[in-house]
Amino acid sequence: MWADIVAQDYDYDENWGQIGAGNKFIYFSLVECHQRNSITAEDTVIIMWSSQAREDRYINDKWYTPGSVYNSDYSEDFIKRFTDITGYLLDTVTYMQSAENLLNSIGCKKYYLSTMPINVSSGLMSNLIKKINPGVSEEILKLYQLTLQQIKPSSYEIIWKGDWSSRDHVIVQENMQERYNSLRERYNQFAGPSWPSFDDFFNDNIKKIKSKIVEEIDKQFNFFDERDKVKLLKRNDRHLYPIESLEYLQSINFSLSAKAVEFAKHWDKLVMAGQRSKWPIDRAKPVRF
């Protein structure tokens, strides 16, 4: 959404992003874009760096971008043997430094935004980190500090204030029947013999249920959180809504025209009313691998 807002102030734009993509995908996209289009000093490149520990892979002639490896269907054995949060940090800053070197050689205008803080050892992602070497991480951050200092504060810090639940009250009104059916199907699939019926669970009629069972439903399967989101008691989508994207851009002092601001406000009203199908952006995807 942020890219659509910014695009209002340019005669031509290309969006090379992809849902779930990490910093490997972003850097590879930059290099391929330059190889295909020959970015010049007259162009502007804006990068929203993603969070670390995302597994981007080019498989069967397309990019596979499932998001964080620590919140995916990768096996525990794979995560234990082949992932390392300090290694992901090294990957990330190398992509960032390489992007900076390339764009500096071109001489174009460039802006670096971010979704998450670079220094994940700060504790903001402590629930995802399996292991980290603070000493090595400190050395990495110091070595690449000149480039890292150019990256704007993250949307996680500015919009979410370091807490994903801080905007649970900001909810899009949408048809919940499909999500309700999906939750009911999953609940009944995993329900133990002592679990309450789905209807009792959904309507919170669980006072007579043993605390051990309630804890199993909550902590092992996270069904209470899913239920609250289906009942529109909690926000389901952690992506920024149009007005939040505008808030982020303005907070980092990104220059926007009145046209771009009005674009964000107008479409935020429609999105919040559940009218996403009326989204005006219908651009062709760039030619790419």
Image: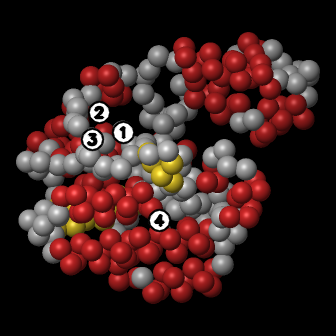
270 is higher (above) or lower (below) than 246: above
**Residue 117: x %, y % from top left:** 47, 65
Label 2 secondary element: helix
Question: What residue sits right under mark 1 in the picture?
Answer: 241
Left or right: where 225 falls relative to 217: left
Q: Are marks 1 and 4 in contact (CB under 8 Å)?
A: no
* Front label number (3 vs 4): 3
Along the line of sight, the residue nearer the viewer: 254 or 92: 92
Question: What residue sits right under mark 4 in the picture?
Answer: 117
Label 3 secondary element: loop
Question: What residue sits right under mark 3 in the picture?
Answer: 285
**Residue 112: x %, y % from top left:** 30, 65
Q: CA distance from mark 2 to mark 3?
A: 23 Å
Label 1 secondary element: loop
Q: CA distance from mark 1 to mark 3?
A: 22 Å
Count of marks, rendered view: 4
**Residue 18: x %, y % from top left:** 39, 46
Question: What residue sits right under mark 2 in the picture?
Answer: 268
